[in-house]
Image (cartoon, rainbow, N blue to C red):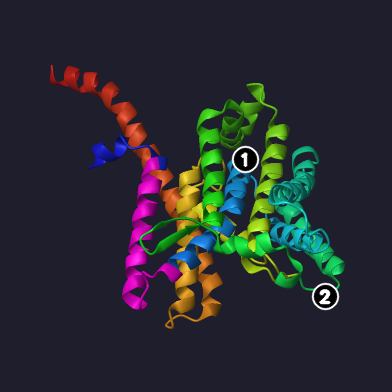
Amino acid sequence: MTAYLRGIHPQNLRVIALALVLALVIIFFSSQIDNYFSPRMFNRIATSAAVILPIAIGQALVVMTRNVDLSVGSLVGIVAYLIGDFLGTHQGLDPVSTLFLALLLGGVCGAINGVLVAYGRVPSIIVTLGTLALYRTFLVEYSDARTITTDSLPGWIVDFPQAVLFSVGDFEVRAMVVIALIAAVIFAVALSRLRMARKFYAVGSNPDAAVMSGINSARVVFTAFVLSGVLAGLSGLIFLAKFGNITVVAGLGFELKSIAAVVVGGVNIFGGSGTILGVVLGTLLVDTIDNSLTRWAVVSEFWRDALLGILIMTAVAADTFMARSFTRLRRKKTLAPESAPIEAREKA
């Protein structure tokens, strides 16, 4: 068994373990909740994950560079509210232009974080904790207690949440879910194929070595925050389409869910490793637990955030344990060939 584990890459092992945990969670809740495997429950979890997945991908890119973005929840709220407000007075704006505007707005906010962290040398947790409050305060002041309602939105965005691309039996796969998965595929391919994207890993693994090898670490970190903002803009637009009625608390708490999805998905909180597939599975696990707990009468809804916190701590502890275990296995594997000749000489 030990020899078999040595041949598996730690990231692949994490993905396999995460898939098993997700399957066990689904089996457990299916035994506790009536009619759990229903199309309605499937759509609830899938559309909820579609909102979180883009910001989880952006969070993963930032975490890979040894940083964190706590402002993503506020960014989702800003984009959802401002785009909804803009569409209320510009009903003729087409979907492509609306998407571009949402991505641009998110990217600008992400760039503010990136400049302060990458070039201002301010710790990311301080910067994004500050912008989390600043962006939310701006939204409160701008909204003046007004709520964006579906009555003020164009028909195409109101109907978008019900748009079905294809069905598998009674289960419908909606357009917003496919859009989130397309974003995941794009970044998964980029991280595995593009040299520029691989720099996120290099900077996170060893910043000093990355600089010595000619990598502009500041530019890489700045790019990570911009992409995090862009993906938060995508989540904001999906959030607007899904809920329609947007208040100043839109996206509140999403930073916790995104970090949970990233850490549970196997992205090393100390940077340098992680996969988008793991982030997808982590997002599904977090949203499956979150949505299932709302229908499980045994646990109060006030414990949902507490359970997410426990999930984060467990994932970090498990990640640390696995990293140390594989380090020991690799050392044994490296030392074994060297010790063989010594043993042979002793026998002679």
Say above or below: 292 vs 328. below
Q: Is residue 56 above or below residue 37?
A: above
Which of discs 2 and 1 lies nearer the camera? The answer is: 2
In the rendered view of the protein, which quadrant contains the N terminus? top left
* Residue that sits furthest to the left in the current view: 348
Q: Locate residue 119, reporting x and y percent.
A: 79, 38
SS label for mark 2: loop
Mark identifier at residue 65 = 1
Residue 213 in the figure: left or right of residue 292: right
Query: Most prominent secondary structure in the magenta stretch?
Result: helix
Question: Of 30 and 206, which appears nearest the observer?
Answer: 30
Give the labeled residue for mark 2. Answer: 145
Looking at the picture, how far across and down is residue 115, in whole percent? 79, 41
Q: Nearer the viewer, residue 86 or 31?
A: 86
- Using a 10 Å C-alpha cutoff, classify the residue at mark 2 as few (fewer than 14 neighbours), some (14 to 19) or many (20 or more): few
Give the residue type that dot 2 points to: Ala
| Up/down of 178 relative to 206, above or below | below
Q: CA distance from mark 2 to mark 1?
A: 38 Å
Q: Position of residue 107 (x, y in %)?
A: 74, 46
Query: Quick one: label 2 or label 1, which is nearer the N terminus?
Result: 1
Q: Is 188 or 135 nearer to us in this picture?
A: 188
| Residue 149 seen | no
Residue 136 is at least partly visible in this image: yes
Secondary-structure class at tag 1: loop
Q: In percent of the image, x 55 and y 34: which residue is there? A: 190
**Residue occupying image coordinates x 36% and y 76%:** 35
Residue interval drawn in magenta: 12-40
Residue at x 18% of width, y 17% of height: 345
Q: Which of the 4 image quarters holds residue 169?
A: bottom left
Say few, some or many: other residues with alpha carbon within 10 Å of mark 1 (under 14 / 14 to 19 / 20 or more).
Answer: many
Rendering coords of residue 339 (x, y %): 26, 24
Q: Viewed as shown, does residue 170 lie left or right of 231?
A: left
